[in-house]
Amino acid sequence: MNHRHTYVAIMAGGIGSRFWPASRTGRPKQFLDILGVGKSLIRLTFERFLKLTTADRIYVVTNGQYRDLVKEHLPEISDNQILCEPSRNNTAPCVAYTSFKLHQIDPEANFVVAPSDHIILDEAAFVGYLEKALAFTAREDALVTLGIQPTRPDTGYGYIKFEQEQIDGVHRVRQFTEKPQLDKARAFVAGGDYLWNAGIFVWRASSILDAFHRHAREIYDILAPGRDEYNTAGEQAFIDAHYPRTPSISIDYAIMEKAANVYTIPSSFGWSDLGTWASLHAESEKDAHGNVINGNPVLAFDTADCLVRTPAGKLVVLKDLHDFIVVDEGDVLLIFPKSKEQEIKQVTQQIERELGDRFL
């Protein structure tokens, strides 16, 4: 495949609040070695995309406060490859900003948009699906999303209903359903014509900009006047002045649910969005008792199905603990039932009310 017009945009502006207390506002999870492999999630993502295109064509969209962290973790990329948002306005504005910038660089730009913090176990298969999607969008005016074959009726994901007819493995999308109730999720999985929405998109810059012009005109009209500023010394000043005025909305709601030229590729490449401690436990290698232990030394007695993350060199002794999250970050110790981890966000909100943002 000709990679001359292939680009990648890695979205890395989130806080990762569900991985508190490891993930903090000052150093969110994409910059952490969450998997215990000696590399941060954003570094793993970057290296994965080097199998698709060259380092000079990989861009990172992040919050302005993380510019230096991006440069620390990805020293191969230039300042112009780091797009700094002055405000957190969800994914639609950041995709529009990226699209205007890449279109100014290369009117034939064909690019992948992907999160910085997902697990991909089969990288060769992943790159193969992206190659297929890029080949399709290079010749068609199409917006493509990689759909994951569902393995369970999970209510935390969006679902994509697709048509059985296909062109080279690419199917037209009939509808999106965001986070359905359990009974609906069960029916979707049983029906066989629904996929999980992984939030990994492929399109030409010209195609997605046309979609913004048609379906999210407010975002388009705010960012389009910066055409002469993108990729110049004036870009950041323009973005700082105008980007905060864009509505806070996801690309799914702003574009994908409205556009008629949306397609999907049913995919299987060992994917996890790694959204919570429980998902990390599910995806990690476990000991004979179902524990995932990232720390040394840790002595666990009659302890099972736990995730333990503790500082190296700190002795930790656990007894009679079952299905718990134990995360020791020095200034914060979290001991929480894994089955109730969705309540952690409420806990952090209470901490902010009572103690300010010192521990967040």
Image (cartoon, rainbow, N blue to C red):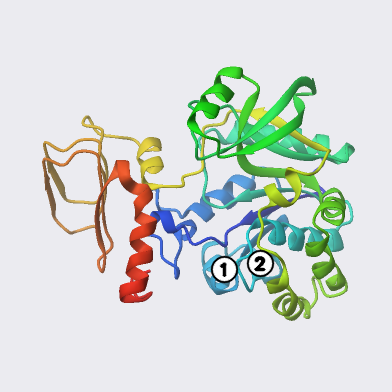
Local SS, label 1: helix
Is the residue 331 above or below the residue 38 in the image? below
* Between discs 2 and 1, the one toward the N terminus: 1
Tell me the CA gap for discs 2 and 1: 8 Å
Compare residues 124 and 103 and report the one nearer the observer.
103
Q: Residues within 10 Å of mark 1 (few under 14, many from 20)?
A: some
Q: Position of residue 319 (x, y in %)?
A: 10, 43
The quadrant the C terminus occupies is: bottom left
Give the residue type that dot 2 points to.
Ile
Compare residues 53 and 85 and report the one nearer the observer.
85
Residue 82's tag is 2
Q: Would residue 85 be visible to someone looking at this image?
A: yes
Q: Position of residue 192 (x, y in %)?
A: 61, 19
Residue 71's tag is 1
Q: Position of residue 276 (x, y in %)?
A: 41, 47
Dot 2 and dot 1 residues touching (CB under 8 Å): yes
Local SS, label 2: strand
